Image (tube, grey):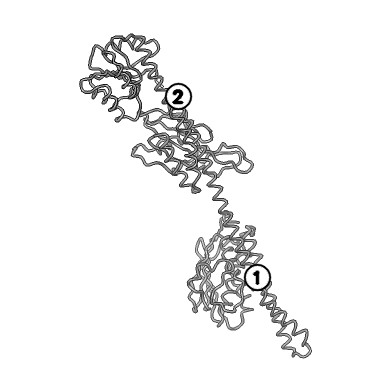
């Protein structure tokens, strides 16, 4: 606060104005700067253009009375300037009316003494300053619970931030309020913090101010904060105080929004972001009580954000729990269904052999035994698929890429399949491009190809050609598996790679609905993509594209 007070003397008598200046200039306790007006209108215009701490007002002016001047002053300004009225002759009725309209004191010119005028002006200005300092906090403290309720009633983070900037601007009656989130540079390591955070704007109040808050905050992150005025302080992320700072003819009120500590870290020296209020420094200076209110307001905002974060986590956990329950139910239903049929066939075949083995021809006995073996293999495959998928879901799949000859690997695997598919299907292998230099996990790649080939054979009930086309370039290899089978209905193709999903046109073709989900998981571990093109009744083509060198960041 300045040690020099500015006093507006509004009086049409020049001699009286000189007397007031002389009396007040002799005040040993205070220094004054004087501005003068010879009419009411001139005085009102000066009030609009220049800051003043008090007004000495003559009751009788050529263009209006002192009471009319007070009415105009209240209409033009939101501030309550202390006014001391002076008159040429005492009038108790006028004095009472002037006091009712907000005059701080009423003096008669004929009785005026230097010490009386000095004391009256000092008391009026000091009282006005005390009211400005302590009058507003009572209102703000009273409103804080209401503001806190508005912050806490919404679970949505964006709505909380919008409410915060709106309420802060309303309570502080300032030009602008903004919320910035602090984003650390890189990943935090134990015992180390980013030296300079990045601030990203999340929300702000609308304002016609052409000097945006962003410029100041950009300067803050670069200079941090030695270039600002010496008598000012700045809130650095990681402190727990609201601070006032001056820059570019603006005053900024800053308060860090604390971040909730996590795990064993019980300290709260990290911040979620910054709450910034901006005020034109020519209008008013921030007061200590406003900084206290701002800090309290920021604490409520931090709590609201923490509650929103917890609620979001709880809802995500609930959704995960629902999905797990649905998956468990689906798993039980699938396993029950897939086990019931082969078990029924196995029991029937075993009972027949037990009861009628001596009456059955040897070829018939072999047929029953082959049926038991096939159904047992089908059940074993289901268990194997479930175990593999559970490993992927738990993030425990072993991914160990190594260089190997992809061409020879696929040739051998197709030859194995030829031994089991019979004469109804023709397996064709085509190669193009550069397939050398591939790094991959051989076991996972086997799962991809075996599942795609077995599906191609299984769902080509009328036989036909099954083509495997391997192509490569400098960075990727592509494997296409094409069949002439029953195809996949168009409406079901978007989710066919999900667990337990089976086409509606499969009829009695056995399967678990897990093979393609395993393919997708294996491809993801390699950092690749899988896509399909299918037409019902015509066939399906699966395309797997894998990078020749997988990134270690893609491992589960």
Asked whether the residues under the numbered discs 2 and 1 touch, taking CB atoms below 8 Å apart as contact, a structural biologist would say no
Q: Give the number of marks.
A: 2
Residue picked out by circle 2: 231
Relative vertical location of residue 406 with respect to residue 290 in this rendering, above or below: below
Locate residue 112, reporting x and y percent.
Answer: 31, 10
Left/right placement of residue 244 relative to residue 393 reads: left
Q: Which mark is residue 41?
A: none
Q: Residue furthest front?
A: 93
Q: Quadrant of the N terminus?
A: top left
Locate residue 443, reporting x and y percent.
Answer: 63, 65
Q: Quadrant of the C terminus?
A: bottom right
Q: Which SS class for mark 1?
A: helix
Residue 442 appears in the figure: no
Relative vertical location of residue 194 with respect to residue 342 in this rendering, above or below: above
Q: Which mark is residue 335?
A: 1
Q: Residues within 10 Å of mark 2 (few under 14, many from 20)?
A: few
Left/right placement of residue 178 relative to residue 62 reads: right
Q: Residue furthest left?
A: 62
Q: Nearer the viewer, residue 292 or 545?
A: 292
Relative vertical location of residue 315 with respect to residue 301 in this rendering, above or below: below
Residue drawn at point x = 29 percent, y = 27 percent: 71
Q: Nearer the viewer, residue 500 or 444?
A: 500
Locate residue 129, reporting x and y percent.
Answer: 41, 22
Q: Nearer the viewer, residue 446 or 337?
A: 337
Instruction: Compare marks 2 and 1 and give the one earlier in the sequence.
Output: 2
């Amino acid at each position: 606060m300045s040690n020099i007070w500015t006093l507006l003397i509004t009086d049409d008598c020049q001699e009286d104005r000189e007397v007031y200046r002389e009396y007040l200039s002799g005040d040993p306790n205070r220094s004054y700067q004087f501005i003068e007006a010879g009419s009411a209108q001139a005085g009102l215009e000066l009030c609009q253009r220049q800051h003043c701490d008090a007004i000495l007002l003559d009751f009788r002016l050529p263009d209006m009375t002192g009471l009319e001047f007070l009415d105009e002053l209240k209409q033009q300004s939101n501030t309550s300037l202390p006014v001391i009225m002076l008159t040429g002759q005492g009038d108790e009725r006028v004095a009472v009316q002037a006091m009712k309209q907000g005059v701080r004191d009423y003096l008669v010119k004929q009785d005026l003494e230097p010490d009386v005028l000095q004391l009256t002006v000092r008391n009026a200005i000091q009282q006005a300053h005390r009211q400005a300092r302590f009058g507003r906090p009572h209102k703000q403290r009273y409103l804080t619970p209401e503001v806190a309720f508005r912050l806490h009633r919404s679970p949505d983070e964006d709505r909380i931030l919008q409410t915060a900037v709106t309420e802060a601007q309303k309570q502080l009656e300032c030009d602008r309020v903004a919320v910035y989130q602090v984003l650390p540079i890189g990943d935090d390591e134990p015992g180390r913090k980013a030296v300079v955070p990045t601030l990203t704007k999340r929300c702000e109040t609308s304002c016609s101010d052409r000097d945006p808050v962003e410029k100041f905050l950009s300067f803050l992150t670069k200079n941090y904060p030695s270039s600002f005025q010496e008598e000012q302080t700045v809130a650095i992320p990681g402190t727990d105080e609201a601070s006032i700072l001056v820059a570019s003819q603006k005053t900024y009120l800053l308060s860090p929004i604390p971040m909730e500590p996590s795990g064993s870290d019980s300290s709260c020296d990290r911040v979620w972001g910054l709450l910034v209020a901006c005020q034109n420094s020519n209008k008013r200076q921030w007061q200590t009580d406003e900084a206290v209110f701002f800090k309290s307001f920021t604490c409520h905002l931090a709590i609201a954000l923490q509650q929103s974060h917890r609620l979001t986590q709880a809802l995500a956990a609930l959704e995960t729990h629902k999905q797990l329950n649905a998956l468990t139910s689906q798993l039980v239903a699938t396993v029950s269904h897939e086990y019931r049929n082969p078990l029924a066939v196995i029991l029937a075949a075993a009972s027949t052999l037990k009861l009628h083995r001596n009456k059955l021809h040897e070829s018939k006995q072999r047929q029953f035994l082959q049926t038991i073996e096939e159904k047992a293999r089908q059940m074993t495959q289901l268990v194997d698929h479930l175990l593999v998928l559970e490993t992927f879901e738990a993030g425990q799949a072993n991914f160990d890429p190594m260089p190997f000859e992809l061409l020879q690997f696929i040739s051998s695997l197709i030859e194995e399949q030829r031994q089991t598919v019979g004469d109804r299907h023709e397996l064709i292998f085509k190669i193009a491009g550069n397939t050398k230099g591939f790094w991959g996990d051989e076991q996972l790649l086997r799962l991809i190809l075996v599942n795609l080939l077995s599906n191609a054979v299984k769902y080509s009930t009328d036989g036909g050609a099954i083509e495997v086309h391997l192509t490569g370039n400098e960075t990727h290899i592509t494997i296409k598996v094409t069949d002439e089978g029953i195809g996949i209905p168009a409406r079901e193709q978007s989710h066919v790679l999900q667990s337990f999903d089976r086409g509606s046109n499969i009829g009695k073709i056995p399967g678990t609905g897990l093979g393609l989900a395993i393919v997708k998981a294996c491809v993801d571990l390699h950092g690749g993509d899988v896509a399909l093109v299918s037409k019902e009744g015509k066939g399906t083509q699966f395309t797997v594209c894998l990078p020749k060198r997988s990134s270690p960041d893609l491992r589960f």
